[in-house]
Image (cartoon, rainbow, N blue to C red):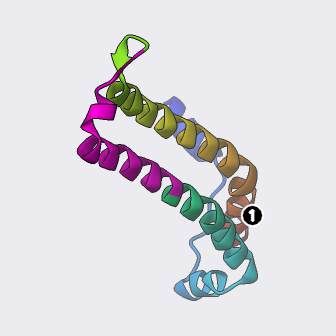
Amino acid sequence: MAESRAAAAAPRRRTPSPEEYIAMQESGQFADLRRTFRGFTFPVFIAALVWYFVYMVSAIYFPEVMGRPFLGMNVGIWFGLAQFVTTFAITWIYVVYANKNFEPRQAAIRAEMEG
């Protein structure tokens, strides 16, 4: 019952035509959003990939270093835990950046397309 009232109270969105989607895709507004997205995600992705490969190459070619004790565990375990910390940090940074830089642009595009 509450769901039907909420659905009835929600504004109706129009469905844009295929031509409108194509026009938006070719617009400067969409190009700016895409440029902002790529400008953040590509460098972060490359950095994370390099960090992962450093970890893997170290584990494969330098097992004696990875096996050294350090603060109660070996270096390899600390490196592995750092991978998790890095993943969560990247996710948090992405969410903060996206909320600040992507969401306003996406909302403007959505509002223009769906009216």
Q: Nearer the viewer, residue 91 or 113?
A: 91
Residue 75: name its quadrant.
top left
Which residue is farthest front?
64
Q: How many marks?
A: 1
Residue that carries the numbered disc 1 in the rendered image: 108
The magenta region covers 47-70
Please determine whether, in this image, residue 6 is positioned above or below residue 103.
Answer: above
The residue depicted at 73 percent of the width and 55 percent of the height is: 101
Q: Nearer the viewer, residue 25 or 66?
A: 66
Residue 102: name its quadrant.
bottom right
Q: Main secondary structure of the magenta part?
A: helix
Position in image of residue 115 (x %, y %): 71, 67
Q: Is residue 23 left or right of residue 74?
A: right
Which residue is farthest top?
72
Instruction: Tell me the crowding category of disc 1: few under 14, some 14 to 19, or many 20 or more residues within 10 angstroms, Cα based.
Output: few
Please determine whether, in this image, residue 113 is positioned above or below residue 79.
Answer: below
Position in image of residue 105 (x %, y %): 73, 62
Please determine whether, in this image, residue 28 is positioned above or below residue 47.
Answer: below
| In magenta segment, residue 62 | yes
Position in image of residue 16 (x %, y %): 59, 76
